[in-house]
Image (cartoon, rainbow, N blue to C red):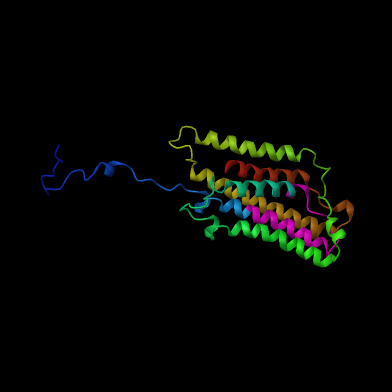
Amino acid sequence: MSTPIDPSGNKPLFSSLDASQPESVAPRHPLGLPAGSVRALLALMILGLIWALVVLQQTQNIKPPPIYLYYLMFLALGHFFAAHGKSIAGKGSSEPSPLHLPRGVIRTLLLLGFVAVFAWRYYKLQDFDSFLKLQGPSDSEEQPFLPFVLVGAFFLGILATHVVRLGRDSSDATPPWFQDVLAWISLLAMLGLAAEVIILVVINPTLEPERQLHMPNWQMALAAIISFYFGVRS
């Protein structure tokens, strides 16, 4: 069968069957950054707060890191490392790594942060027995429902993503506005937690006990927002 010819220019009307097929478009990720960038920022901020508080324990009389930071730490580390090759570009992928950094840089920074903090702690103590006696998280008994709230928020994020994707052409087609709004809210929530830590470390020690600020519900709400975001991006 001959190819149809355009009478005006003697050119084929269809150069090939592939010409009629739509070109594949790379998926857009939150804030237009590479996949995993917002999660990388959240993980670095969570771990950075914990590292800073552990270091300050050796130089100032402050409480250990709040319990919600430990829960978020386990959630962020477990999710971020497991997401590579799934919702984050893995080895051999042509997509850029989080924050456009060389592959493996974020994970290396997270590991080196722990090594640096514990090495510094041992250097200050100069005693292995004292090094092992790390204080547990503060306020662990004041928020007994915190683990359930964070786990529930995580699975609620997974459910919300499936609901938003209903009726769309692709199972991965999450609306850009949905991605960006949640990314900004989660980053603002993380900044709110950082401000709360500053209140605990800097402001509360200067106040009388009856005037000190304690915001367990605020902590729980902001931590749940961050957990929700990790669920959405699962």
Left-right relation of 186 to 92: right
Across and down, in percent, residue 226 comes to 65, 46
Q: Residue at x 46, y 46 (%)?
A: 27
Q: Which quadrant of the figure has residue 141?
A: top right
> Is residue 59 found inside the magenta-colored segment of the image?
yes
Across and down, in percent, residue 78 comes to 65, 47
The region drawn magenta spans 42-69
> Is residue 107 found inside the magenta-colored segment of the image?
no
Q: Residue at x 46, y 32 (%)?
A: 167
Left-right relation of 225 to 61: left
Looking at the image, which is closer to me, 7 or 78? 78
Q: Main secondary structure of the magenta part?
A: helix
Work out which quarter of the rendered image holds the C terminus and state it: top right
Work out which quarter of the rendered image holds the N terminus and state it: top left
Across and down, in percent, residue 79 comes to 63, 46
In this rendering, is residue 147 above or below 63? above
Across and down, in percent, residue 221 comes to 70, 43
